[in-house]
Image: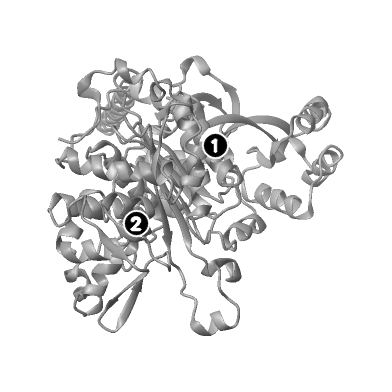
């Protein structure tokens, strides 16, 4: 009996010890875990706790401005007034929209869009009802907002183009990024690009300098509940966004706007360039489009109107358009002939109005001919027969080399996309493209800027600038305060002076093809220039018999292009201007607009007028090497 009791007590003691040991071990493990949680991992779990309580909302940056050469904004930001609706606060969304409709029209399509978006998103996320409201409507809604549950007047920042159509092709526009834009951007930029209301460059300078203009997003710290609803903002603990940087162009807003207005409704382009540095002063394409329409989403009707216009308002003619240079090219041919010694300035060629090559007659623009002309008279009167002759003497290889030296056929990088290469043909090109040999007739046509030769208005402006200054000017669109004059071309001064004398005669001597212009219109300042007509369609014999004899008798799209290149002051050039009028019927359509644009440019620059050049240092004077 006693032995049984002792055995039971021993069993109890063992069990008690085991249970005590197990309990002690359990409490030891729990204590260690609590120590780890509360002491060792305090910082980690504090961070997790904070992340559960606080969120960071991305705040988009202000986009950098685009400025003209004098600091005037041609692309900036403005406040846009919008109305948002928060479904959770509104309760009945339809009823809230009914209340709002008393102060602004709400179409059925807009109502359906708001309802659809409200169903798709969390109820506490605001839905945009309308944006870019006028101040009167916005202020009226703002006044009554306390009585409309869930309705919030708000202000966002949107892009604005104060010069509208004048700068549209150069500056471009911004739009909401699409999926392709997001996929092609930096991966870390996706959150910013998907932010409501954020826009990126889609064209022109806006896309070319996107990285510089965009800036960097900030983060606004907010306190949220378990569902992610914002309770309060904590701006003192937030990271502010970094605004984008400004971009400064070489363009002069006044000249750009004036040139656009001066070209009017013509399908035309104008380029103004500093002949010594290559800075572009104006780069205009007409008709144009309003970039402000694209910012918030252009309507189908507005886009169709631009797309279907036969004057191509969406096409940047100054950079992308290519045309036969016509007689504006003859100065290059004259320079090649003088440099290679195939023509003496005093030698004359007899122009009877046509010359025969094989079984074909090549005509001069003046059917009765010019009589005997030397180089000066040939440039001044634009005699085709003279240039057929010296082009044949030169041969296409030497003519091709000199044309490339003047910029024809060169694709200039001005910092934005869409710059055309043009075409300066040679035998290798014709063999590769047409599988045909080069003919003397091809050389004839090239000698008067026709045939296969194509140049953009930008290339013609560079050609004019190089003729005027004798420098290897490269066009540039972005302002550099230390922009030095370009190096010299290496042509003989005598060559350049003889060509310039002929170009001055075009404007200021009787018989010159633009003598009727009467010059620049600024006392003491002479200009030089060259007319050009690029043939689009040749009137057939049958059409002539039917009474179609002049350009005015043809449909607009079949009329010749009109061109004019000019620079001033003629004795010490500073600025050059080129105007191309599509289907203008001949050079007369371009001469007066070009003269007026150049006059405005010279008038704005005191250094371009008499009495100022005497103060320039000799090494700043343009001329040949």
The residue where tag 2 is placed is: 455
Indicate which label's residue lies in the foreground, 2 or 1: 2
3 left or right of 297 in image: left
- Label 2: element kind: loop
The x, y position of residue 11, in whole percent, is 27, 33
Q: Nearer the viewer, residue 405 or 156?
A: 405
Q: Is residue 165 visible?
A: no
Which residue corresponds to the image point at 60% horizontal and 82% vertical from the top-left?
546
Question: Residue 335, relative to residue 59: is it above or below?
Answer: below
Q: Nearer the viewer, residue 25 or 509?
A: 509
The x, y position of residue 450, in whole percent, is 34, 65
For label 1, the crowd category at 10 Å Cα-Cα, with few meaning under 14, some 14 to 19 and many 20 or more, is some
Q: Nearer the viewer, residue 89 or 299?
A: 299
Question: Label 2 to label 1, Cα distance in Å?
Answer: 24 Å
Q: How many marks?
A: 2
The x, y position of residue 433, in whole percent, is 24, 74
For label 2, the crowd category at 10 Å Cα-Cα, with few meaning under 14, some 14 to 19 and many 20 or more, is many
Here the colouring is one colour
50 left or right of 227 in image: left
Question: Residue 260, relative to residue 53: is it above or below?
Answer: below
- Quadrant of the rendering where the C terminus is positioned: top left
The residue where tag 1 is placed is: 257
């Amino acid at each position: 009996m006693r032995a049984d009791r002792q055995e039971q007590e021993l069993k109890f003691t063992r069990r008690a010890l085991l249970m005590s040991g197990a309990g002690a071990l359990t409490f030891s493990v729990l204590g260690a875990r609590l120590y780890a949680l509360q002491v060792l991992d305090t910082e980690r779990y504090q961070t997790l706790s904070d992340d559960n309580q606080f969120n960071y909302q991305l705040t988009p940056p202000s986009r950098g401005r685009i400025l003209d050469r004098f600091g005037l904004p041609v692309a900036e930001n403005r406040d846009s007034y919008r109305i948002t609706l928060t479904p959770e606060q509104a309760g009945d969304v339809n009823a809230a929209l009914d209340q709002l409709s008393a102060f602004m029209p709400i179409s059925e399509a807009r109502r359906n869009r708001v309802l659809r978006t409200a169903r798709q998103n969390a109820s506490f996320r605001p839905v945009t009802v309308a944006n870019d409201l006028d101040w009167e409507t916005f202020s009226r809604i703002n006044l009554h907002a306390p009585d409309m549950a869930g309705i919030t007047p708000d202000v966002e920042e949107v892009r604005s183009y104060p010069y509208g159509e004048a700068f549209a092709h150069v500056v471009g526009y911004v739009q909401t990024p699409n999926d392709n834009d997001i996929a092609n951007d930096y991966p870390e930029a996706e959150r910013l690009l998907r932010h409501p209301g954020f826009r990126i460059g889609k064209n022109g300078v806006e896309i070319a300098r996107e990285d510089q203009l965009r800036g960097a997003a900030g983060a606004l710290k907010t306190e949220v509940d378990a569902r992610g609803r914002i309770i309060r903002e904590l701006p003192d603990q937030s990271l502010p966004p970094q605004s984008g940087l400004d971009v400064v162009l070489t363009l002069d807003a006044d000249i750009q706007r004036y040139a656009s207005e001066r070209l009017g409704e013509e399908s035309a382009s104008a380029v103004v360039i500093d002949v010594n540095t290559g800075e572009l002063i104006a780069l205009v394409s007409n008709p144009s489009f309003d970039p402000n329409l694209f910012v918030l989403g252009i309507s189908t009707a507005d886009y169709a109107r631009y797309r279907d216009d036969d004057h191509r308002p969406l096409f940047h003619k100054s950079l992308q358009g290519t045309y036969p240079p016509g007689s504006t090219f003859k100065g290059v041919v004259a320079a090649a002939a003088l440099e290679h010694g195939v023509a003496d300035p005093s030698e004359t060629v007899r122009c009877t109005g046509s010359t025969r090559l094989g079984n074909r007659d090549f005509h001069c623009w003046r059917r009765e001919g010019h009589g005997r002309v030397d180089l000066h008279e040939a440039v001044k009167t634009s005699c085709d027969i003279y240039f057929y002759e010296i082009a044949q003497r030169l041969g296409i290889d030497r003519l091709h080399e000199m044309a490339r030296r003047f910029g024809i056929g060169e694709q200039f990088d001005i910092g934005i996309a869409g710059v055309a290469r043009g075409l300066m043909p040679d035998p290798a090109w014709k063999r590769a493209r047409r599988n045909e040999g080069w003919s003397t007739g091809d050389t004839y046509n090239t000698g008067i800027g026709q045939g296969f030769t194509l140049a953009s208005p930008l290339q013609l402006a560079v050609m004019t600038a190089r003729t005027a200054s004798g420098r290897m000017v490269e066009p540039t669109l972005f302002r550099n305060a230390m922009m030095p004059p370009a190096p010299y071309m290496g042509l003989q001064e005598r060559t350049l002076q003889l060509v310039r004398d002929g170009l001055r005669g075009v404007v200021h001597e009787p018989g010159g093809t633009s003598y009727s212009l009467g010059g620049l219109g600024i006392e003491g300042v002479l200009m030089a220039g060259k007319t050009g007509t690029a043939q689009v369609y040749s009137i057939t014999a049958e059409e002539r018999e039917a009474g179609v004899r002049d350009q005015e008798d043809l449909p607009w799209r079949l009329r010749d292009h009109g061109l004019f290149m000019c620079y001033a002051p003629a004795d010490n050039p500073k600025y050059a201007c080129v105007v191309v009028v599509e289907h203008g019927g001949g050079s007369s359509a371009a001469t007066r607009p070009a003269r007026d644009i150049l006059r405005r440019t010279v008038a704005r620059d005191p250094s371009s007028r008499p009495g100022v050049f005497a103060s320039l240092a000799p090494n700043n004077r343009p001329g040949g090497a």
